[in-house]
Amino acid sequence: MCGIIGFTGLKQASPIILEGLSRMEYRGYDSAGMAVISPQNRMQLAKVSGKVAGLYEKTDNGAAFPGVCGIGHTRWATHGAPTEANAHPHVSMHGQFAVAHNGIIENFVPLKEELLAKGYTFQSQTDTEVVAQMLEDCYEGDFQKAVETVLSRIEGSYGFAILCADDPGTIFAVKKNSPIILGLGEGFNLFASDVTALVEHTREVVYMEDGQYAKVTPDSVELFAEDGSPLPLKVSHVSLSVAAAEKGGYEHFMMKEMMEQPEAVGRALSPRIKGGEIVLDDFRLTKEDFNKFTKIVITACGSAYYAGLAGKYAIEKFCRIPVDVQLASELRYADPFIDEHCLLIVLSQSGETLDTIAALKECKARGATVLAIVNVVESAITKLADSVLYTWAGPEVAVATTKGYTTQLAVLYLFAVYAARVLGRLDAEQYASVIRELQALPEAVRNALKTDCDMSNLAQYFKDAQHVFYLGRNTDSALAMEGALKFKEISYIHAEAYASGELKHGTIALIEEGTPVVAVCTNPALLEKSLSNIIEVKARGAVVTAVVPEGLPGSEAIEGYADHCIKVPALRDVFASIAAVVPLQLLAYHTAKLRGCSIDKPKNLAKSVTVE
Ligand code: BG6
């Protein structure tokens, strides 16, 4: 995700653009830039790698950029390093056009080759610069016509803000699969990627729809359909405060990010399933490569470690290769049995966790091949790995990870199925069938979010607890650990995950009248066993909340015994965690909220621990 803004009116544009970019920094913050047309109709361009603060500095808080019409962009890099050269806006070769873009132009390579053949030179590797050059190439004095010509040739997803130095005061906004909202003012008009950047200037907005483009001037906003036909403006009134708008209207970033999980999991999966095949970007391993590996080691910290534990079951089940999951902070000092026959998979949302970096370096020094599964583009871990698979979760602001965890699972599942196919463990029919299951996961996550109300009600029973136990067997034991971590890190109530079968060997001594127990029972093959564990703890007074797969034989029996029963979509055992984790996230959130805890920034914690 990126943040785009365009302003045109009677006031200086730079300060408004800078403020708007600051408001949208949570959408992406690894580079920023702005272009303002000067009173002499010259395109003024400033770009920085890093945060918007650098742009304030570079333009002397905007004072160095006089002009009343401009655009700005804050970037969440998806393709191409977050360097100044790759920052937006991109300007055409002779400075006539400036373009800020959110999205991906899928056919930019052949378009770029055409322009190169015509003698155009490029300053960046981005797809966006191609659009700026195309505008210049087809411009014959009519700004709108140039925009329409380019739109007719590009494919992909885009939110554009486009300036033309020959047409000061006019900005074109274009929307296709990336949000653009128009803001209607008196003597000025503006638009941005979300209302956060608009609400302090106007509350009268128009949510653009896919395929539409708008011609924005200080005293008019004209909206057009994809075929160029004019459209009426459907004006909405925004009542959100700026702070609320930043969170997409949710009270906390954590809730916003939980609700983003279906789309985030979809982004992690769908671009990598093409024509019925799993294509892991540029990560390619042949059967010979895999046969070189005698084991796979997964290493990470915190929730990423628990994602690794869940992913282990998927890889072992499909590939029949032993997977060892180790805490990075332990692995780095364990004098590990790691050599050139080891594939090391490193999981990290931030890509900056020091323990994980140290473990990676230790294993690489011993000859391991390193695959990193990371969210933040061009982060430290991506520089150290031999291959990188991004999770495409988008910026995650809440310290307690949610979409960071589920998108790591999604990529691990993809890897497991890809490897199984390469190793010949899945025939064509099985492969196609499992791929269909993967493609259904975003919807399963969406359905799991429907438990929000139930979990909000259930939180009443947990908010005053001293101790909570999370039980699970096999794949569910890994999920129970993530559930317990989510719970304790934001509600500050002690929670412990335990392998259900192990409880009777000691810890059951702690179960007493009223002890809340969350029994994670999503593994269809183990429902009966899970039931006996529930009976065990109930016999000692526990109040049991069971998480069970919807409509599976055996679920009813559990429903009959548990005090509360949360139903989640029935999935294959090794995929179940990606949906079943959602009610556990929601339970942690609502319990913490009832306790008045600081949900997005829990005490003592950091989003990424870059120290020992
Ligand atoms: C902790 C975070 O500091 O680090 C957790 O609070 C996270 O949410 C863990 O799982 C590992 O961080 P990362 O960025 O390496 O996944």
Image (tube, rainbow, N blue to C red):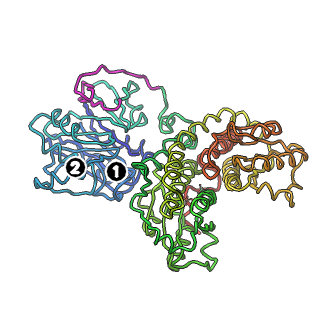
Q: Residue 64, how many percent across, how many down?
A: 25, 48
Q: Is residue 233 magenta?
A: yes
Residue under label 2, please give it: 130
Q: Which mark is residue 171?
A: none
Please state which of residues 544 and 492 is positioned toward the viewer in this rendering.
544
Q: Is residue 109 magenta?
A: no
* Structural crowding at the residue carrying mark 1, measured as other residues with C-alpha within 10 Å and reported as few (<14), some (14–19) or many (≥20): many
Q: Residue 334, how many percent across, how many down?
A: 64, 77
Please state which of residues 267 and 232 is positioned toward the viewer in this rendering.
267
Answer left or right for 298 relative to 466.
left
Q: Which mark is residue 32?
A: 1
Q: Quadrant of the N terminus?
A: top left
**213 vs 48: above or below:** above
Residue 394 visible in the displayed image:
no
Tag 1 or tag 2, which sits nearer the N-term?
1
Q: Residue 89, how many percent across, how many down?
A: 27, 48
**179 vs 535: above or below:** above
Nearer mark to the viewer, of 2 and 1: 2
Answer left or right for 119 relative to 311.
left
Please state which of residues 221 and 104 is positioned toward the viewer in this rendering.
104
* Structural crowding at the residue carrying mark 2, measured as other residues with C-alpha within 10 Å and reported as few (<14), some (14–19) or many (≥20): many
Image quadrant assignment for residue 505: bottom right
Magenta part of the protein: which range? 209-238
**Which image quarter has ligand 1?**
bottom right
Please state which of residues 305 and 566 is positioned toward the viewer in this rendering.
566
